[in-house]
């Protein structure tokens, strides 16, 4: 909000107070909004997300995620990750910003592999996965052989044994 004040011409004469008035004009400002474009938080820890909002009269704030009005919780979980639209509403205008919230969390438990019997000359796939943010990285511990290939993508680790032989026997 901006204020502009002025006196009537008679006020400039120090000895003349009758008919002297001070006029002040209040100008309303539409909302102004400053928020980060991205925010990263650790799961289950209180966040310190801060946006600066100005405007007169005080604007209302609406948070939206996936097209629905939401209330941002004080403690974020992995389900709170995503893109948000934050709108400041006033009688004069509306201002919106978009923010990406990224919640970091530990990897989930890896499901243990079960023992497998493989015929000589057969192919077998061993697969393990878990979820986490950032995405977990996997490593396999095994006897290195030319017929064993490892592939990691999208949080899934695959170990492919082609044409299994006696060198592939062991723990993985």
Image (spheres, helix red, strand yellow):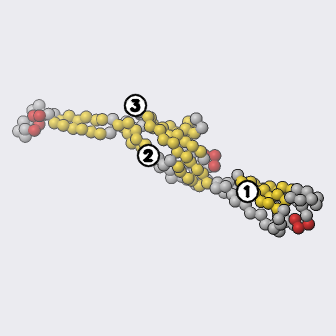
Rendered residue at 11%/37% (across/down): 11
| Viewer-proximal residue among 107 and 17 | 107
Other residues around mark 1 within 10 Å, as few (<14) / some (14–19) / many (≥20)? some
Which quarter shows the N terminus? top left
Q: Earlier in the sequence, mark 3 or mark 1?
A: 3
Separation (CA) of disc 3 from disc 1? 53 Å
Which residue has dot 3 on it?
A: 91
Along the polypeptide, which appears first: circle 3 or circle 2?
Answer: 2
> Which element type, helix, strand or loop, lies under badge 2?
strand
Residue 61 in sight from this viewpoint: no
Q: Residues within 10 Å of mark 3 (few under 14, many from 20)?
A: some
* Residue assigned mark 2: 34
Q: Secondary structure at mark 3?
A: loop
Q: Quadrant of residue 29?
A: top left
Q: Is residue 81 left or right of residue 16?
A: right
The residue mark sitting in front, 3 or 1, is 1
Residue reaching furthest left?
15
Q: Which residue is mark 1?
A: 152
Find numbered disc 1 in the image and state the secondary structure of the residue it sits on: strand
Q: In front of the other: label 2 or label 1?
A: 1
Foreground of the two, 169 or 57: 169
Q: Residue at x 91, y 57 (%)?
A: 122
Question: Where 23 sits versus 53, above or below?
Answer: above
> For residue 93, what is the image quadrant?
top left
Percent from the top left, x then y, of residue 152? 73, 56
- Neighbourhood count class around disc 2 (C-alpha, 10 Å): few under 14, some 14–19, many 20 upward: few
Residue 120 versus residue 114: which sits nearer the camera? 120
Where does the image place residue 68, in percent across and percent down from the top left?
A: 58, 35
Closer mark to the observer between disc 3 and disc 2 = 2
Whether label 3 touches label 2, CB < 8 Å: no
Please identify the quadrant where the C terminus is shown: bottom right
């Amino acid at each position: 909000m901006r204020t502009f004040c002025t006196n009537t011409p008679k006020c400039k004469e120090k000895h003349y107070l009758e008919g002297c008035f001070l006029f002040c004009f209040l100008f309303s400002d539409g909302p102004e909004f400053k928020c980060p474009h991205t925010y990263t938080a650790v799961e289950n820890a209180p966040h310190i997300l801060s946006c600066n909002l100005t405007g007169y009269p005080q604007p209302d704030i609406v948070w939206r995620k996936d097209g629905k009005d939401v209330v941002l919780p004080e403690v974020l979980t992995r389900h709170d990750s995503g893109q948000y639209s934050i709108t400041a509403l006033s009688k004069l205008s509306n201002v919106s910003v978009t923010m990406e919230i990224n919640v970091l969390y530990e990897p989930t438990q890896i499901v243990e592999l079960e023992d497998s019997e493989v015929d000589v000359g057969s192919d077998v796939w061993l697969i393990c996965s878990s979820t986490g943010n950032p995405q977990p990285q996997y490593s396999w511990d095994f006897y290195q052989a030319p017929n064993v290939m490892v592939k990691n993508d999208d949080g899934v680790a695959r170990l492919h044994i082609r044409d299994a032989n006696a060198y592939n026997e062991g723990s993985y």
